[in-house]
Amino acid sequence: MHADNFYGTDADAMIQDINEDITVLTRFSGGHLDPLRFKWKSRVFDVDRVTGKWEEREGHFKLHHFAVITKEEDYYELIYNTRTMDWMLSKTDLEG
């Protein structure tokens, strides 16, 4: 599988580090959390699909990573930190 198929992005797109706090509308159900919509730079993005989920440990706490594709077919990586209970936009294929 090519990276452009996994991320749902154009082959020429560059993934950029962003690392900015964001607000996320999240569904918590059955012990799982799913990002539905997020706000970054005064703009709201609807999540069309989650293409990947993984976890990392930060001491006793978890970082929940989500690779998402928006309705505009753009790629974003979101992180939920269980210690701070905050969301961060980690990466995107858009120019910031």
Image: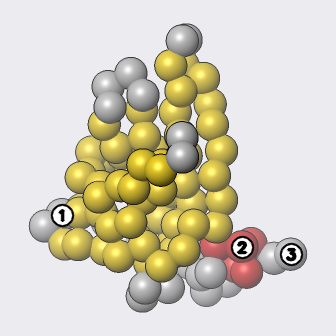
Quadrant showing the C terminus: bottom left
Q: CA distance from mark 3 to mark 2?
A: 7 Å
Q: In terms of image quadrants, where is residue 27?
A: bottom left
Is residue 56 shown to the viewer in this render?
yes
Q: Earlier in the sequence, mark 1 or mark 2?
A: 2
Q: Residue at x 46, y 44 (%)?
A: 79
* Residue 49 percent coordinates (x, y): 54, 74
Q: Tag 2: residue type?
A: Phe
Looking at the image, what colour scheme do you see?
secondary structure
Q: Image height check: is 42 above or below 9?
A: above
Quadrant showing the N terminus: bottom right
Q: Image height check: is 50 above or below 48?
A: above
Quick one: which residue is furthest to the front in this view? 30
Mark 3, Cα crowd under 10 Å, few <14 / some 14-19 / many 20+, is few
Q: Residue at x 59, y 81 (%)?
A: 9
Q: Earlier in the sequence, mark 3 or mark 1?
A: 3
Q: Which residue is mark 2?
A: 6
Q: Tag 3: residue type?
A: Met
Q: Earlier in the sequence, mark 3 or mark 2?
A: 3
Q: Tag 1: residue type?
A: Lys
Instruction: Compare residues 2 and 39 and report the one nearer the observer.
Output: 39
Q: Residue at x 30, y 47 (%)?
A: 20
Give residue 1's mark: 3
Is residue 91 shown to the viewer in this render?
no
Quick one: which residue is furthest to the right in this view? 1
Q: Image height check: is 32 above or below 36?
A: above
Q: Which residue is mark 1?
A: 41
Mark 2, Cα crowd under 10 Å, few <14 / some 14-19 / many 20+, is few
Badge 3 element: loop
Q: CA distance from mark 3 to mark 1?
A: 32 Å
